[in-house]
Image (spheres, grey):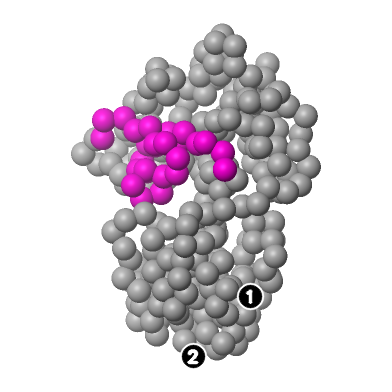
């Protein structure tokens, strides 16, 4: 049987889906429909742009949106999580597990008899950048204010005072906003995933917002400390989670706060240093 797999749109979810993709690829011939980073993340598999029509008659929706199910509704068999009111579009709706998001991807693969094993893993490849050994990496940016911790510069200064080598990272198109935060420290922006993976081999700890970069670093074997605001370690975390005492509205997973409470600011520099 041939499977068309619709990968998630966000890098973090794409990384969390790696074990499910690998399990499906062991059991079937697959083609993965993914964003631009998909070719680098799912190296070794057949990857095409998300706009490509699915091949065969069986679709696997790892992207949880209603629109993805609607666009592939003509397939004879369509497997995916029954979320966002799309269950009626699926031939095999899978109830969303209550645990970590990785478990949802594993449940979808399990419907097709694929056994998902282990945590996400990415084999480091690419060209490493020339950086201090055993440095602490900082990933300070997110377009969503609810997961953007505002104290990365203070953290970098404290770490430098303790004799640590500190390196800032940011994604494509983020250098302009991250440069003022990282002023005076090395900053690497927009690395391709294979080069990012190779460079991370010298990183002994990455401190990050809840982001795709953090999930990718963990898949490369790097110790990660993730700071949570509107999100929670139990659902989307990786590595060691740092959370403030929860408010009544957490976690909400909103990209902006409707009541003006920036819960992530309640995590202090000392909380992270400890």
Indicate which disc, 1 or 2, sits on the residue closer to the N terminus. 1
In the rendered structure, the answer to whether residue 93 lies left or right of residue 25 reads left
**Residue 55 location, quadrant:** bottom right
Can the viewer see residue 13? no
In the rendered structure, the answer to whether residue 156 lies left or right of residue 110 reads right
Q: Which disc is residue 76 wearing?
A: 2
Nearer to the camera, 119 or 86: 119
In the rendered structure, the answer to whether residue 268 lies left or right of residue 141 reads left
State yes or no: discs 1 and 2 in contact (Cβ < 8 Å). no
Rendered residue at 60%/45% (across/down): 220
Which segment did they paint magenta?
A: 221-246
Q: Is residue 74 above or below residue 60?
A: below
Rendered residue at 34%/33% (across/down): 243
On the image, the x and y values in percent for residue 228 come to 39, 37
**Residue 242 location, quadrant:** top left
On the image, the x and y values in percent for residue 130 come to 77, 29
Q: Find disc 1 in the rendering and name its residue.
A: 31
Q: Is residue 93 above or below residue 34?
A: below
Q: Looking at this rendering, what residue extends furthest in the top direction?
A: 161
Nearer to the camera, 97 or 135: 135
On the image, the x and y values in percent for residue 13 come to 50, 55
Rendered residue at 40%/85% (across/down): 91
Can the viewer see residue 136? yes
For the C terminus, which image quadrant? top left
Nearer to the camera, 26 or 109: 26
Rendered residue at 69%/61% (across/down): 43
Dot 1: element: strand
Tell me the CA gap for discs 1 and 2.
17 Å
Q: Which disc is residue 142 wearing?
A: none
């Amino acid at each position: 049987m041939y499977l068309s797999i619709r990968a998630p749109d966000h890098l973090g979810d794409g990384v969390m889906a790696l074990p499910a993709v690998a399990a499906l690829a062991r059991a079937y011939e697959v083609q993965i429909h993914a964003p631009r980073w998909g070719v680098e993340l799912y190296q070794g598999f057949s990857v095409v742009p998300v706009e490509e029509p699915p091949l065969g008659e069986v679709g696997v929706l790892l992207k949880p949106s209603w629109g993805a199910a609607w666009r592939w509704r003509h397939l004879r068999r369509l497997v995916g999580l029954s979320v966002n009111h799309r269950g009626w579009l699926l031939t095999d709706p899978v109830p969303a597990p209550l645990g970590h998001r990785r478990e949802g991807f594993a449940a979808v693969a399990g419907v097709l008899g694929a056994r998902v094993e282990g945590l996400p893993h990415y084999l480091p490849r690419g060209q490493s950048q020339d950086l201090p050994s055993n440095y602490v990496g900082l990933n300070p940016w997110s377009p969503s204010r609810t997961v953007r911790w505002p104290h990365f510069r203070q953290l970098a200064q404290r770490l430098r005072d303790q004799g640590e080598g500190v390196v800032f990272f940011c994604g494509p198109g983020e250098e302009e906003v991250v440069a003022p935060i990282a002023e005076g420290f090395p900053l690497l922006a927009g690395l391709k995933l294979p080069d990012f993976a190779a460079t991370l081999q010298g990183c002994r700890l990455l401190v990050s917002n809840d982001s795709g970069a953090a999930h990718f670093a963990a898949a490369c074997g790097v110790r990660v400390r993730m700071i949570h605001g509107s999100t929670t370690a139990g659902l989307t975390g990786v590595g060691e989670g740092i959370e403030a005492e929860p408010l009544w509205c957490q976690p909400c997973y909103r990209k902006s706060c409707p009541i003006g409470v920036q819960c992530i600011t309640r995590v202090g520099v000392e909380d992270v240093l400890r």
